[in-house]
Amino acid sequence: MSRVRNQRKALISGLVCNLVLNERITTTEAKAKEIKPLVDKIIGKVKKIKTNPDKKVAIIRELQKNLNKETVRKLSGDFADKFSERTGGYTRIIKLPNRKSDDAKMAIIEFV
């Protein structure tokens, strides 16, 4: 993903937001592998909201630095309950056939 630092950060932030809002996106394999650990960390932080309500404001402010309000709202609502019993591995990557136009490796990244 040869991009300037700011463009790369914006791309990753956009991919994470779209994944949370749609719960499944199709992208290149490299991008999917890049955002998988970030999404897992975000879900881990969101789970702390339910277990430790004292840190709720701090965690939400931290998430709002990189994600939009709609994404943070969905994370703090649905996802905290959805993954409460799971300890890790919140996303999976499913490989697809290569894209015909440029033969790029494609993948679907989705929540388990």
Image: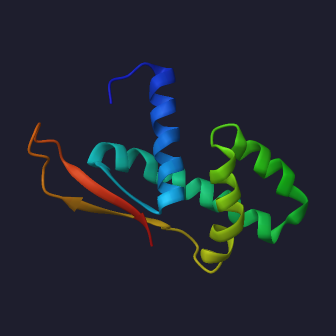
Q: Position of residue 67 (x, y in %)?
A: 63, 43
Question: Which quarter of the figure has residue 51?
Answer: bottom right
Q: Farthest residue in the bottom direction? A: 85
Q: Is residue 103 left or right of residue 38?
A: left
Q: Is residue 84 above or below residue 104?
A: below
Q: Is residue 11 above or below residue 33?
A: above
Front one among 92 and 99: 99
**Picture mark count:** 0
Q: Is residue 90 left or right of residue 75?
A: left
Q: Position of residue 50 (x, y in %)?
A: 78, 70
Front one among 109 and 17: 17
Q: What's the residue at 26%, 55% (across, down)?
A: 107
Q: Farthest residue in the right direction? A: 54
Q: Farthest residue in the top direction? A: 4
Q: Is residue 45 left or right of residue 6?
A: right
Q: Position of residue 83 (x, y in %)?
A: 60, 74
Q: Is residue 66 left or right of residue 15?
A: right
Q: Is residue 67 above or below residue 59?
A: above
Quadrant where the image shows the N terminus: top left
Q: Is residue 40 above or below residue 77?
A: above
Q: Position of residue 37 (x, y in %)?
A: 48, 52
Colour pattern = rainbow
Quadrant where the image shows the C terminus: bottom left
Q: What's the residue at 31%, 59% (across, down)?
A: 108
Q: What's the residue at 85%, 52% (across, down)?
A: 57
